[in-house]
Amino acid sequence: MKYFFITTLTPRELLTPLRSALFELYLKSLKNQTHKDWEVLLVGEEDKREGNFIYLKSSSKSKSDKLKVAHHYLLEIQNKPDFIIRFDDDDIISPSVLQKASEIDFDCYADSFHSFYDITSGKTSQQKRNWLPNTVIHKFEYAMAEYGEEKIPLFMHDHSQAWHVYYSSKKIVYAPKLHPIYLRIISPTTITSKMDVLKLNNVSEFNKSAYSVYLKSFGNWRKFDTPDFKQYFDPLVKVWESFSNSKILLKKNFLDFFR
């Protein structure tokens, strides 16, 4: 089974020391895959190839336009993959997930409990939501299928709006709660927090109050141990402590940091 990841890279003008460090862990989590038949397309600002990593240049800054570039690439290649996975450049994927997925039959393999890691506290949260997360494993033919009024490939659609509707009549297999496909890393540079419009070079430059409100939307934060991601917890702590120049204090109320 061959897997093909699609990642739209953060524009260099918005890269911060924190975001760059998270990207290194993103790369490490891919290199640590126990299943070796995979490639990743990174759509950004340069053309090159390094092993399984294919960097493709795009003049566009928007994610939607970069996904169009990825679509064109997939149409052109002769050796089509079996599965497609969208994966953000600041998240971490389980090292064994591709191996596990290769042993089961599905149209879409997904997390039913969305798993989040807050880098400022070292805590995690899991929420059961009514839509599919951004990082699921699509069977190739379905990821590429034209869908919706726009008639664009399914993988290019908003995951929270379209994917659960499309797959409602197909075979979705959910990963066990304690063994999620990936951890979505929440940080002051998380794109959907709308805090990456400025190049934040240190912790004093971001809006702590707004980030505190944002964190509360992810539910009950707590210490969450899973062997799939244990190797990344210490590096994540070091990334934040280096950026913030302070120790993470695992207090009962971690939002004390923002007061």
Image: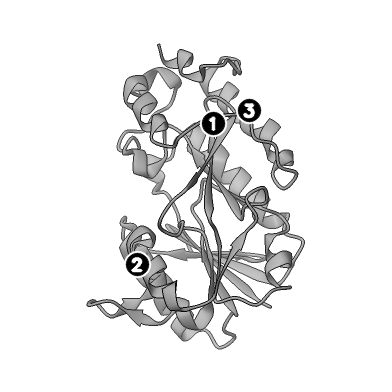
- 205 to 102, vertically: above or below: above
Residue 214, image quadrant: top left
Name the element at disc 2: helix
Q: Earlier in the sequence, mark 3 or mark 2?
A: 2
Q: Is residue 61 left or right of residue 119?
A: left
Q: Amino acid at mark 1?
A: Ile
Q: Earlier in the sequence, mark 2 or mark 1?
A: 1
Do labels 2 and 1 touch, CB within 8 Å? no
**Image quarter (top left, top right, bottom left or bottom right) of the C terminus:** top left
Q: Nearer the viewer, residue 199 or 220?
A: 220
Mark pair 3, 2: CA separation: 35 Å
Q: Amino acid at mark 2?
A: Ala
Q: Position of residue 239 (x, y in %)?
A: 60, 30
- Inspect this view and state whether residue 4 appears: yes
Mark pair 1, 3: CA separation: 7 Å
Q: Is residue 125 left or right of residue 93?
A: left
Q: Amino acid at mark 3?
A: Val
Q: Earlier in the sequence, mark 1 or mark 3?
A: 1
The disc placed on residue 237 is 3
Residue at horizontal 31%, vertical 55%? 61
- 153 to 124, vertically: above or below: below
Estimate how packed mark 3 is, as few (under 14), some (14 to 19) or many (20 or more) residues with alpha carbons within 10 Å: some
The disc placed on residue 119 is 1
Mark pair 2, 1: CA separation: 29 Å
Do labels 1 and 3 touch, CB within 8 Å? no
Residue that numbered label 2 is attached to: 162
Q: Nearer the viewer, mark 3 or mark 2?
A: 2
